[in-house]
Image: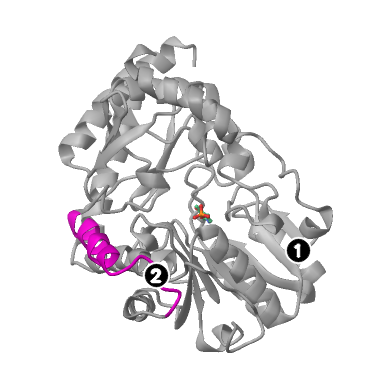
Amino acid sequence: MSLRKLSYEYYERAKRVLPGGVNSPVRSARAVGTHPLFIREAKGAWIWDEDGNRYIDYVCSWGPLILGHSHPKVVEAIKEAAERGTSYGIPCKLEVEMAEQVVKMVPSIEVVRFVNSGTEAVMSAIRLARAVTGRKKIIKFDGCYHGHVDALLVKAGSGVATFGMPASAGVPEEVVAQTIVLPYNDLEAVRSAMELHGKEIAAIIVEPVAGNMGVVPPVDGFLRGLRELCEAQGALLIFDEVITGFRLTQGGAQQYYGVYPDITCLGKIIGGGLPVGAYGASVEIMAHVAPDGQMYQAGTLSGNPLAMAAGLTTLRILEVEGIYEELNEKAAYLERGLKEVAENRGVTITVQRVGSMGCGFFTDRSVKNFDEVKTCNTEAYGVFFRAMLDKGVYLAPSQFEAFFVSYAHTMEDLDKTIEAAHYALKKVLESGY
Ligand SMILES: *Cc1c(COP(=O)(O)O)cnc(C)c1O
């Protein structure tokens, strides 16, 4: 503990004035049997805690920092914008440029509305789907997380999964009564539900690569099957690309898999490290949004120049030739390294990865849905997490979260990480895994 003495002290203070000492539950690191770090500074792939310890960071603010922390061009853009005012509540040029950029990059988006978080994006997308179809029911998948939207806080991933909560207190039954939860990757279950409720279903919402129960890729034909079932029943398909947008390719998972949703939710990377979310769709669908249409949604700070400048700068950098190839190569190198180390140590783990997002599951099988994810040994993950921390590597403080490789991670960082894993897996074995 003494190594992280100041973090511990801040945590003790924080617990008196913040629920659980944090502003977002998984950060508490309770699930991995320790206290959170308090970060003083971050640059590139590294974070420094208040005690001055340096860590290679694979959380990257839970995905947004695909270019690494405080990228010089992004910092410059924020500074420049701040000099001219942080928010006007009146339109500005940057909003137009940012919207044009998103429309250019994301195949199924013709018109986009900016909000301030992924949660807001999803909440608005659900309202929009209901407004367009005049229907109420929503299909979601077990283990997918869509922000803390009331109607979707059932069998959710991320913190809800980490703390083993079936649902959230404070969400009325009537609200979730319109939500149907099905197993991820189970097209048959969706088919049956659509046969039963077809004309009542406003939308199917899905993480095209599940990234909030560890990383679970869609099986062949799953996304395409959802697309077809939606069309057959007049329901809308919503891709929650808050993680996958601008992560897998410039155009997100829809471009990666060649399956196009009706509505796309964006967040995380789109803000370049500042709070931004967005939802977008065709001209026809977005015509329902106020002031053009009857679906109301608004935001005091939406489209503020600081957030737009950070996002726009990030997205423009992501258009540089070869960026995604390099990201994927680095992540593949890390995956190979982890697999080799596990094999050498004789530890059975399953590493699943799509592009630069991945997860090491403490289980001996590949996992396709949340029931299978739940078979993972979370105790072992805790041991692994703490040992990696001791070796200067910061992973997500939960088995049910992804690791993210950023453009700022160097080969040296990756080698150090693999070396640390060699040590950490020894600790896992010693713990009786
Ligand atoms: C993070 C996340 C959200 C919520 O975004 P916030 O900005 O935290 O509100 C929604 N959907 C997915 C898939 C996410 O990963």
* Magenta residue check for 83: yes
* Label annotation for residue 192: 1
Decide if ligand 1 comes within 8 Å of the CB at mark 1: no
Start-end of magenta stretch: 72-90
Q: Amino acid under label 2?
A: Gln
- The part of the image, by quadrant, that contains residue 41 is top left
Q: Main secondary structure of the magenta part?
A: helix
Q: Residue at x 61, y 43 (%)?
A: 370
| Quarter of the image with the N terminus in it | top left
| Left or right relative to 19: residue 315 | left
Q: CA distance from mark 1 to mark 2?
A: 28 Å
Callout 1 environment at 10 Å: few (<14), some (14 to 19), or many (20+)?
A: few
Q: Could you tell whether 198 is left or right of 128 in the image? A: right
Tell me the residue that label 2 is attached to: 255
> Residue 157: x and y, percent?
59, 45
> Is residue 183 within the magenta segment?
no
Camera-side residue of 99 and 240: 99
- The residue positioned 38% from the left and 79% from the top of the image is 103
Residue 339's quadrant in the figure?
top left
Q: Residue at x 43, y 66 (%)?
A: 257
Above or below — where is 108 with respect to 147?
below
Q: Is mark 2 within 8 Å of ligand 1?
A: no
Label 2 secondary element: helix
Q: 321 or 117, which lies in front?
A: 117
Amino acid marked by disc 1:
Ser
Q: Is residue 261 above or below residue 356?
A: below
Is 269 placed above or below 199 here?
A: above
